[in-house]
Image: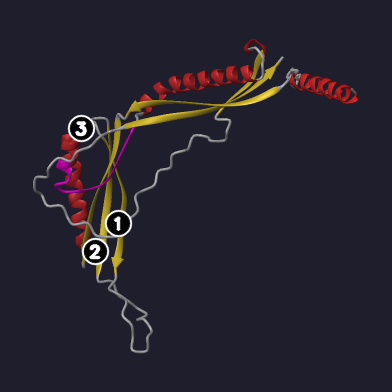
Amino acid sequence: MTIMKNFAAVAAITTIALAAHAAPTDSVPTAGTLVVVPAFGEVKHVNDQVVVTLAIEEQDKDKAAAASRVNTKMKQGLEIVKKEDPQASLKTQGYYTYPVYPEERMLPNGQPVKQRMPTAWRVGQYLEVTTTNLDKLPKTVAAAQKILTLNSINFGLTPETTKKLDDQRIAATYKNLNERITSIANAMGRKVGDAVLDTVDFEGSGNYAQREQAYAPAPMAMRMKAADAVEVAEPSFEPGETTLQMQVVGKVRFK
């Protein structure tokens, strides 16, 4: 009989403990809580501008002769580009002249020759072409390659398009901020109406827009073969698209 009483007592205590464990606990108070919410947004657009860098380089024992050929061919290249794409913006840059030395020769004692005389001179110049005429780009480049060489090509957006997309980018970022605030409020068991947006800091993460810096292309380490004035097959280009991103940090206080 005593055993049965003890068993009943243990069962009662266990039941009370389980009931207490199953009872819902009070959540942490969130009144007056300040929540920092990061959000992101982006828009995409087909590239509508291209920056093409063309170049010419000559090498000769006579520095003046090399420079003269570079000047003549750059002038011819400019005339070709202007004819093919009259609306293009042109800028010559990166004119360079430097000596070409023979391979270092060692003396019998193992020491290098102290004074080396240049055996030739390398002269070159770059031409930057900015245009929105992408349909005619292959023809323009092919025509220029009769005289000049193609050094690089970069597609992007015009300033006008970038400015137009800025409204869409801000709207997309702000929409994502509101979506995140709603999700956070639900997770906290609060109504969205209890949240007050205290601060909106665009680019508040410190990831500020990079400032563009213009650098002239470095002189080519190897001599480019001079282009022959013959017909060149048109190259193929795909403009692709650009993604513009934005970040925002919002500070939300719950009532």
Residue sitting at x 33%, y 89%: 108
For disc 2, the neighbor class at 10 Å (few under 14, some 14 to 19, many from 20) is some
Q: Which residue is under mark 1?
A: 220
Secondary element under disc 3, as helix, strand or loop, is loop
Range shown magenta: 142-156
Q: Quadrant of the C terminus?
A: top right
**Does residue 199 lie above or below 220 as drawn?**
above
Q: Which residue is mark 3?
A: 86
User: For mark 1, does the 10 Å Cα neighbourhood hold few (<14), some (14 to 19), or many (20 or more) residues?
Assistant: few
CA–CA distance in space, label 3 to label 1: 29 Å
Residue 54 position, x and y percent, is: 25, 46
Residue found at the very far bottom of the displayed protein:
109
17 relative position to 115: left or right: right
Disc 3 residue type (three-letter): Pro
Badge nearest the viewer, 3 or 2: 3
Q: Amino acid at mark 1?
A: Met
Give the CA separation, mark 3 to mark 2. Answer: 33 Å
Mark 3 is surrounded, within 10 Å at the Cα level, by few (under 14), some (14 to 19) or many (20 or more) other residues, namely few
Q: Amino acid at mark 2?
A: Lys
Q: Is residue 155 magenta?
A: yes
Disc 2: which residue: 63
Q: Pick whichever of labels 3 and 1 is earlier in the sequence.
A: 3
